[in-house]
Image (cartoon, helix red, strand yellow):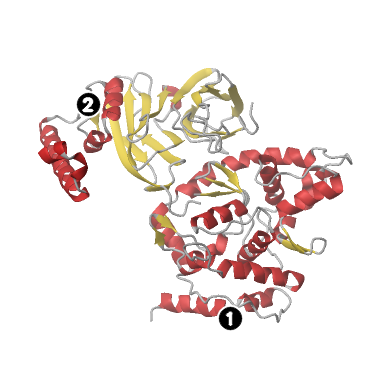
Amino acid sequence: MTVAMAAVLAVVVGSLISCAETRASEKKVSLTPGPEVEELEQSMSYEEYQKRYKEVFGTATEEMAEDGNPAELALDDGLDLVNAVAGSKGLSCASCHGKDGVKLKGIAATYPKYDPAIKGIATVALQINRCREGNMGAEPFKYESYDQLVITMYVKSLSNGVPIHVSIDGPARPFYDKGKVYYFKRQGQFNFSCAVCHVKYAGYMARTNLISNNKHHGDHWPAYRLKWGKTGSMQRRFRGCLKNMRAERPAFQSEIFRDLELYLTSIANGEPVQVPGLRM
Amino acid sequence: MPKGVGKIRIRLPKHIAKGEVIPVKALITHPMETGLRKNKKTGKIIPAFYINDVRVYYGGELVTHADWSIAVSANPFMTCYVKADKAAPLKVVWKDIKGSVYEKTVQIQPE
Amino acid sequence: MKEMQTQPNAVSRREFLKKAGFASVAVMAVSTVSSMFSTGGRSPLSWPGAQEAAAAGRDVREVLRANFGDRTIQPSHVMLKTPIIAENGAVVPVAIDSDLPMEAGNYVKKIYIFVDQNADPFIASTDLTPASGRAAYALRIKMRKTSLVRAIVETNKGVLYGDTKTVKVTIGGCGG
């Protein structure tokens, strides 16, 4: 048995003991057993995956991100929206959250988060709309519209560099479990689950695509995606994946998508927020 | 001008030595519609709307002039080079086929 | 060939490939012979990428001829950098660099970029001046499908240099 195999095994065993175990050291101990999900072995370590990525795609995307991510230009529009007065109460985001939303620094790293008011998981996008409706008396943004994306992007970018630390214990636990179950649930005409590709076959080629490892899936959305030629949210990507799986596609910010976003972001716990991202 | 079009960022190296050849990285937001795509819902062709002319001036002098076709990506990015032998403004001007002009000036200050 | 004319639909894929393979070998042979007799540079159609130009149809040949006539292109002094694979061809970064001098009276006048398989193979051209200091340019381009990308550089004396790279464009797959 090679060292690499041993490493893979260690990862697999670790993940089988369930995430609850590993999180336990960071957060308060949670004795809730994880949900029952299909047992899938992680194909390779993240380092191995990175090596393969370099071999297949080179450094083109990284260089492009350095040279200029088109989404960064839209951040100014997000800033304008934060300072803009909207709605019946004559308030702007800046009225409560400080000029340019400075008081929101670091907050997005804790999202998605359990919110007792909606008895569920609130994402940044949802929270912005709830704030607009409830506190400002303004029209909520249409999901995936330009304004909605740039303001979400701006608010999240205030937390850039802050390690993600979403809570998956306490009241968030059942929702985390739901997200995880969804991630591992086989569905659609092809009978795939998210995990089949992004856990079991991450790092392998699907035709000429390298299937991505899920470690960093949660830390850079909304991102500029080369294929779209524009910025989009993580949930738009969910829908793209589900379409390819020939599966039913839930609506933006539906309950299950928010739970899934929580699960995926929790995998990136400890990684710094880097919004907006740049993806293939 | 449609929303989110014509936002510009020009990136220069932080430290510039006199006489050094420096990269000028310029990014502008623009849809760069080819005129070949159809609106999926209505089936109508989306009219062409793209930048076809880019000029870089350094101290009022034309340094680089690019002709672009429809095949330059949306939100076009380009890198060109300038010999920084004087302290002078660097102006980049984009023109699209509808006649809109987008421009931005940055100062080159060799140390 | 007779078969093909009488029953165009009856040609199996395998047969077609055989024929196409033969044709390309023939083209290769011709281009090898012609390059043996040429001195240094080669005409736009026989330098690297000639087979692809032949396969790409009239457009590329015409565009190249319209821009460069029958002048020779030397496959040196120019480096074209592209990714090997582009997932979806909407954004493909290309960078052209060259070590040619940029002095008054002896400089690179123009840089061209062509993509064989695009509806219009002409992508962009850039006029440079000695004030540019370096004959280099980078751009992000759209590619309809897997194709040869050509970078051609023209000096103020009318000498042409070039480089080519193939970029694999993948459509579908896990695009989403």
Q: Which residue is mark 1?
A: A17
Residue A168 visible = no
The picture places residue B50, in percent across and down from the top left corner, at: 51, 27
The picture places residue C49, in percent across and down from the top left corner, at: 25, 37
Between residues A147 and A69, which one lies in front from this camera angle?
A147
Q: Secondary structure at mark 2?
A: loop
Between residues B3 and A259, which one lies in front from this camera angle?
A259
Q: Residue furthest right?
A: A89
Q: Please indicate whether residue A96 sits to the left or right of residue C90 in the image.
A: right
The picture places residue C108, in percent across and down from the top left corner, at: 36, 25
Residue B32 visible = yes
| A21, above or below A155, in the image | below
Residue type, numbered disc 2:
Thr
Q: Chain of mark 1?
A: A
Q: CA distance from mark 2 to mark 1?
A: 67 Å
Q: Residue at x 46, y 22 (%)?
A: B65
Residue type, numbered disc 1:
Ile
| A24, above or below A220, in the image | below
Q: Please indicate whether residue C136 sits to the left or right of residue C74 in the image.
A: right
Q: Which mark is residue B67?
A: none
Q: Chain of mark 2?
A: C
The picture places residue C37, in percent across and down from the top left corner, at: 10, 31
Q: Secondary structure at mark 1?
A: loop
Q: Which mark is residue C72?
A: 2
Q: Residue at x 29, y 19 (%)?
A: C157
Q: Residue at x 69, y 51 (%)?
A: A156
Labels 2, 1: one chain: no
Residue C79 quadrant: top left
